[in-house]
Image (spheres, grey):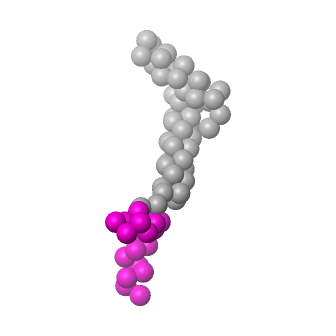
Amino acid sequence: MEREKINRLNELAAKAKKESLSAEELQERDLLRKEYIAACKADFANTLNNTYVVDKRGHKRKLVHKEKEKNKKAD
């Protein structure tokens, strides 16, 4: 997410604390929040996709999503 959008979201949050937002500002804030949350989730997923667990023997293994692991065991 671009820094300008984050700054705008912060401006709207600060304004909401001081006074009420107009309908357009509320809509803009909601869209920016959704975009921000989606960006955070994507960053977190990317971090997990590049995370490895090292066991006692020194073997690295990639983290596996629980649902994928369940489906793999069911096969």
Q: Which residues are magenta?
A: 54-75
Q: Residue at x 37, y 85 (%)?
A: 74
- The image shows residue 68 at horizontal and vertical percentages of 43, 73
Instruction: Identify which residue is drawn at 46% across, 60% down.
Output: 52
> Quadrant location of the C terminus?
bottom left
Looking at the image, the residue that sits furthest to the front is 57
- Using the image as rendered, state which of residue 74 and residue 60 is in the foreground: 60
Return the x and y of residue 73 as percentages of the image width and height.
37, 82
**Is residue 20 left or right of 27 when viewed as pictured?**
left
Question: Which residue, as the protein is rendered here, is positioned at the far top?
Answer: 18
- Depicted 60 relative to depicted 24: above or below: below
* Relative depth, front residue between 14 and 55: 55
Give the residue at x 43% y 69%. 59
Magenta span contains residue 64: yes
Q: Position of residue 21 (x, y in %)?
A: 49, 20
Q: Is residue 62 above or below residue 32?
A: below
Out of 21 and 11, give the one closest to the viewer.
11
The furthest residue to the left: 56
Q: Is residue 23 visible?
A: no
Q: Estimate the x, y position of residue 18 in percent, counting from the top left.
A: 43, 12
Q: Can residue 49 be seen?
A: yes
The outermost residue toward the bottom is: 75
Q: Is residue 74 above or below residue 29?
A: below
Q: Residue at x 52, y 23 (%)?
A: 10
Q: Relative to residue 63, is residue 34 drawn left or right?
A: right
Q: How many marks?
A: 0
Q: Is residue 36 positioned above or below 49 on the image? A: above
**Quarter in which the N terminus is drawn:** top right
